[in-house]
Amino acid sequence: MKKLKVLWLSALSCNGNTHAFFNYPNLEYFLDNFEFIYHPVIDSEYSLEDIVCKDIECDILLVEGGISDDFLRANTPILDIIKKYAKKVKKIVSVGTCASFGGIFKGGAYNDVTGLFFDEEKKIDRLEEFRDKAINVSGCPVHPDILVNTLFSIKQELKLKLDNLLRPKEYFAYSIHNGCTRNEYFEYKVDNHKFGELEGCMFYEHGCQAPFTHGSCNKILWNEVNSKTRAGLPCMGCTEPSFPRENLFSTKKNMGIPQELPLGVNKRTYLTLAGITKAFTIERLQKKLIDD
Amino acid sequence: MTPKKRQKYEAIIQKSLELFASKGFYNTTIPDIANSLKMSVGNMYNYFKSKDILAKEIIQYISVYLGQKIKEINEEDISTKEKTTKIIKMYFETASIKPEMIDYFLRIYLSNREVFVDSCQGMICVNEFVTEIMIYFEEGVKCGELRDQDFFSAFGLFMGYLGGMVFLKGENILPKELDEYVEDISNNIYKALSV
């Protein structure tokens, strides 16, 4: 079986996506199908200097981390390395939110940190000629299944449907709220949550961004068992161009109304529904689920 | 509902409001309402199966009426200060033109909770009205005019003040007409709620 040749470049990054990738449960199967010509952590055939200086065959370019004109790898501007390989590859995959939109490094020491094709949600033209090759798999980090499945889709030459931020709809058409085990508490507006506990919805008080964040965290679970919201931590909206926001653990409200509403929900409709659901007092949801 | 039926439905609500205001809620019966509309009691029951259901639908009717008026103000491209004045003006106008409507809200809905306890839990029956007040507050905070605070502390200040004034008017205690208080009350409420 012909393996696709993959180059994984690390730009302004914490390597979080690399670490998440290592948790992919079928890594051997992945490596039967793909070969890293270079990866910053995994042993690979070529060094970074080889990547910069030599003309090496490559099918997919993966970039992890934010991009800045000033940022060098092997004494070469990262953008030059990206452009060199962007020309020859089939697809360019921005791995994680930093490479997709700029992410957390926008607040750091480097100037003008952006993603490859976007600065937050604004399109940028640094690599405009390659936009038709671009796929963003955002997340801090991206779920390894989403990254790997996307790479397999490329290998199988499937036509990936992308959203307006170039994310595969297969994974990003959903909201994180979809599949959350706290939906009952959301429906009846019960947020008597304590961090880490099973009970309560975290949208109303605790800053949970799941209802307006695109992704599949509650559909494709982390380590096959859990998600932030299931474990009792609010969704931090890490797949979105606005990540990271401030005050991740409290819901910004204006006179009691959450500033951000669930995706596509009109404010008047939301308030009408809220008025109705607040009328319910459901004792079962007011106390511990499993109470000894 | 056909337009003719809708007209009848509204006539029943209007007549009920008037009778509740003049005779009191408990002293008014379904036959009293039917008689004063020259309807048979049987036909009346085609519209409302019981007095409790009538009571509930009246409060919803008032909520929709006031909610729609505030919605129109909320959708205007004006400052929160101007909205405050307009909402208060509208509320006092309604209390002057349709005193029975506000009277029902204050004296029957708020004072006879046992009638509404099953079918109007929480604020379900005044949802349209409360929703628009919420939007008025929320947009005021968003544009930086109003101070962010708990909804009910603001709602209580707003509605308690207006309700109190209409109550005083109903008791014939106010020396002036309600509309003459609009400016002062708008200023007071706006100052109390603003940043």
Image: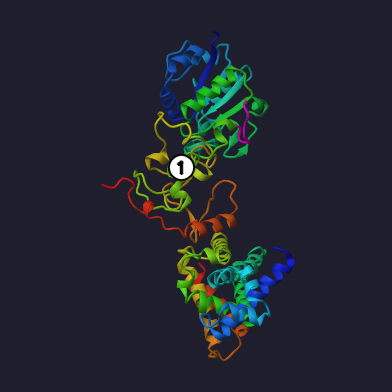
Q: Nearer the viewer, residue A157 or A139?
A: A157
Residue A102 drawn at (x, y percent):
53, 36
The image quarter in which residue B144 lies = bottom right
Q: Judge left or right: residue A195 versus residue A127.
A: left
Describe the element under mark 1 as helix, strand or loop. Answer: loop
Q: Amino acid at mark 1?
A: Met
Callout count: 1
Q: Nearer the viewer, residue A53 or A55?
A: A55
Name the dominant secondary structure of the magenta segment: loop
Residue A31 drawn at (x, y percent):
47, 14
Q: Which residue appears at 65% of the width and 72% of the height?
A: B43
Which stretch appears magenta? A160-166
Q: Nearer the viewer, residue B57 or A75?
A: B57
Task: Classify B7 as above or below A156.
Answer: below
Q: Which residue appears at 42% of the width and 31% of the height?
A: A222
Question: Tag 1: Cα neighbours inside 10 Å, few (<14), some, or many (≥20)?
Answer: many
Task: Classify B38 as above or below A33.
Answer: below
* Residue sitting at the far top: A1
Q: Is residue B66 magenta?
A: no
Task: Classify B94 as above or below B139.
Answer: below
- Residue, disc 1: A236
Residue A10 visible to an observer of this rendering = yes
Classify the position of the N terminus of chain B by image quarter. bottom right
Residue A114 visible to an observer of this rendering = no
**What's the chain of the residue with tag 1?**
A
* Residue sitting at the far left: A292
